[in-house]
Image: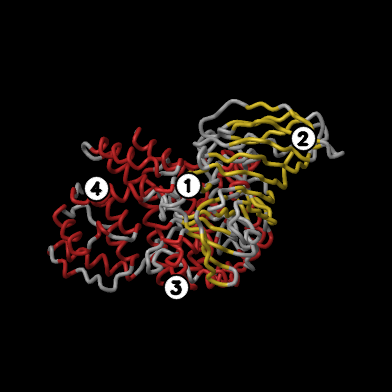
Amino acid sequence: MRLLVVLLVFFAVVAKADPHSFSNSDIVSHPHLQLDLTADFDKKQLSGFVELDLEWHLPEARELVLDSRDLTVQRVMGRTAEGQWQALSHQFGKKQADHGQALIIGCPEQYNKVRVYYHTSPNASGLQWLSAEQTSEKTQPFMFSQSQSIHARSWIPLQDTPERRLTFSARIHTPKTLLAVMGADNSANLERDGDYQFEMPQPIPAYLIALAVGDLHFKAMSERTGVYAERAWLDKAVAEFGDTEQMMQVAGRMYGDYAWGRYDILVLPASFPFGGMENPRLSFITPTVIAGDKSLVSLIAHELAHSWSGNLVTNASWHELWLNEGFTNYVENRIMAAVYGEERALLERQLAVQELQAELPDLAPADTRLVTDYSGRDPDEAFTQVPYVKGMLLLQFLEQRFGREKFDAFLKHYFANFAFQSMTTERFLRYLRQTLLQDPDTVSFGEVLEWLNQPGLASTFVAPQSDAFAQVDRQASQWQQSDDLSKLQTTDWSIHQWLHFINQLSASVRPDQLAALDQTFGLSQSQNAEIASAWFAQAISRNYQSALPHIKTFLLQVGRRKFVVPLYQQLASMPGGQAMATQIYQQAKAGYHPLTQVAVERVLKR
């Protein structure tokens, strides 16, 4: 009982405030904002103003504190109750490397609106500006945002915390040859005229505000789904993601109606640092998942699943990222099972567990708990496999114990009950005890707490097992013992079986055996980014020199952090590899997103 009290006190302390925000949102908040910004590709900056509708929570409060990072503020204005605009004083707080600085605005009275005129830095952490040469078409420049976790403050001064939600409207000015899109209602922008307007009527956390500008074109996939992309990717993406409507229907039946109107997909340049970003109404997606065979579309299922878990019910702080990503990984896997079959979902689940188990030894024990205190740290460090996969495994444990039908009903009610709200682990536990945990013989509260708070995997963890992977393991063993590649019957192997084979290659595999694999199956030339990156990792670890030119080409073309950061880390660890890794990075750096640059530079410094 004492342990339970201590744990709940910990949850309550974590949930009280967001240590990654300077804002005083408990005193004054902005439930709506309006943007009016111009995209200047020559200066690599957004300039204009943000207008914040204010809601004051204490009658004596006379100060508004916002989050900012590397912003230049020209002036701040406040609108009185009579509709008059007055100049306000402002100052910046002390700058912190990972968090930016507070923008402190003095308010002689409680204004109902405050307007901040500003421009961004060319090095804003949440924006990437690409030259025409860095795009697929190589004719027009491109710009896109990435606001998660705390990078919205680098292009909008606002209360950058998932504790608070807001609606927004926006007017974006661009060169007339380019199209602007946002994670919002894009329907008002029927003509490419350089003047675009957007509305987001549903309240979202700040990290889901998203903007992109480029030579974009649109093609519908269904009445409520479609793709924005450069022409080089448009038809390929429509063919690859054509099952999106079916995914939406499946998820809606299981977890409640889709709440966001449309679901469109924006295919970004290959420099995008993540697989996808779940911006409501318009998911931002890397082109590295366009494999030509729908083998990697679990990423689309993942970003769509965020429409329920993360976007609809949101973690209140980055300490509790599992409430976003663990739920989303679980929903993603259920969508994949419904659309593509239970066997494929099992293979993908097992691969995810392998990734988690490979990463756990490299993490501090405290960082392998589902609820981890990231105070004083960059919240981007929270994005390990722990919240994603361990969080999913907790939910699968509950599903196995209670049965799928009962657990589906629980989740559907959970999403409906807490829609458009921020969630803490403590609040989730209360709800869980009130609903599912009525019978301690099915699942005890202690078993749930072990999943949440003990390092590593819980004692109730049961590893997923696939016969398809077992067959691959047998063939791999026979090949390695005999050096006879005919033992590998790969004709019917799925991408998932290939990934399992590559990831599980024995440490005793020799470089000449790698060369034989490469010559026979062309792994170094694979157009599937997942296969290529897994193969390159094995090649580096076994000093397979013939793969190095292909690794360099890959690192110069792809900026997805999941792929490039581990490869740089491995290259730098090779004898004499530090110089090679640094040389490649200097060539590739200009094409990497600022978030990728930071991650790679941390690796190279170590």
Residues under labels 2 and 4: Cα distance? 58 Å
Q: Residue at x 40, y 50 (%)?
A: 562
Q: Secondary structure at mark 3?
A: helix
- Which residue is disc 3 drawn over? 340
- Which residue is disc 2 drawn over? 78
Location of residue 100 (image quadrant): top right
Give the mark nearer the N terminus: 2 vs 3.
2
- Which residue is disc 4 drawn over? 540
Image position of 489 with respect to 65: above or below: below
The amino acid type of the residue labelled 4 equals: Ile
Give the mark nearer the N terminus: 2 vs 4.
2
Q: Residue at x 72, y 26 (%)?
A: 89
Contact between labelled residues 4 and 1, with CB atoms less than 8 Å apart: no
Label drawn at residue 235:
none
Give the mark nearer the N terminus: 1 vs 2.
2
- Which residue is disc 1 drawn over? 383
Q: Residue at x 25, y 70 (%)?
A: 490
Give the mark nearer the N terminus: 1 vs 4.
1
- Asked whether the viewer can see residue 50, the reply is yes
Residues under labels 1 and 4: Cα distance? 25 Å
Residues under labels 3 and 4: Cα distance? 34 Å
Give residue 27's position: percent from left, percent from top: 74, 37
